[in-house]
Amino acid sequence: MDIAQLSNQLNQTLYTLRYGDNPAELYEPIRYIMALGGKRIRPLLVLLSAKMYDEDVENVLLPAAAVEVFHNFTLMHDDIMDKAPLRRGQQTVHEKWNANTAILSGDVMLVRAYEMLLGIAPDKLGKVLTLFSKTAAEVCEGQQLDMNFEQREQVSIQEYIHMITLKTAVLVGFSLELGAILQGAPDSDAEHLKQFGDNVGIAFQLRDDLLDVYGDKDKFGKQVGGDILSDKKTFLMLTALEQASPEQLQTILDWRDNTAAGITEEKVQAVTAIYDQLHIRQQTEQQIDFYFQEALRHLEAVQVPDERKSTLRSLALQLMERDS
């Protein structure tokens, strides 16, 4: 199973998509964000899942592209809420145009994603649309919880895992479930693939949390320590708050909300030092491995020959070992 070939098919499909023309201010931002690229992991997972059941994935290409359009819609709106200046190294849509345009363009992307699913065979369409709507709402729920947590003094690790499950993982799970459904896989296989994706998605976000603190700045593509600087309640921070001694806790609290000019590097170093004292990096890696092993358990339960799972397993392993 050739990932490069599947990626090429996917990119060709994405390239041919037409979102609309007038007014140009509405549609140009969509073409802009879709042209920024990215890993295209979610639509690729749709195709890899589908290919386990049928070599011909022509009928799956447009639904896979719909997942990518939806994902980019969420990014466009998230960037507005996060006031993010850059996306994939380029200006975000709301910076290049304005927030109102980004909201409207994102709305159209959601509409187009639904339209792109309408070509699915009638016997599968209702189920897919129901699952897609459920997933879309869960992604929004996860984003709202993330914003809620910014205003709360205390957030539990369990609450954080629930939030990233909704915000990040469920779309990964849906992508794998979608590919299986479209190719007529047994319901049990589709469910195991969804659970595989959910757990990979959680592990993927925990890896992102880890790289934000311990990643190579040149490879990670954004400022290392950004989560610390913005006082974000990641798995690392919440674990540290839970396990810190009174002295360590006071140090973290003293640095929290400290936005004085020139303290950037000092703040990151001080909090990271406490992480090191508490072995937070190792604990995070253990959690990543826990969810990855849980994912593999579900992949093992999928009733297709092992050789048909090998590419999906390898891709998941690459995601877990990534340094960017």
Image (cartoon, grey):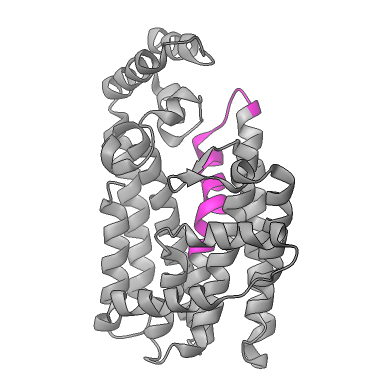
Residue 265 is left or right of residue 135, and the answer is: left
| Residue 187 vs residue 147, the one in the foreground | 147
Q: Residue at x 33, y 24 (%)?
A: 275
Q: Residue at x 70, y 57 (%)?
A: 25
Q: Which residues are magenta?
A: 151-172
Q: Is residue 61 magenta?
A: no
x and y percentages locating residue 170 in the rendered image: 54, 60
Q: Is residue 69 above or below residue 56?
A: above
Q: Is residue 49 above or below residue 55?
A: above
Res 187 seen here = no
Residue 111 is left or right of residue 9, and the answer is: right
Q: Is residue 245 above or below residue 322?
A: above
Q: Residue at x 43, y 73 (%)?
A: 11
Magenta: main secondary structure: helix
x and y percentages locating residue 28 in the rendered image: 63, 60
Q: Is residue 170 magenta?
A: yes
| Residue 107 vs residue 180, the one in the foreground | 107
Residue 231 is left or right of residue 20, and the answer is: left
x and y percentages locating residue 287 in the rendered image: 35, 44
Res 200 seen here = yes
Q: Is residue 207 above or below residue 104?
A: above
**Quarter of the image that includes the N terminus:** bottom left
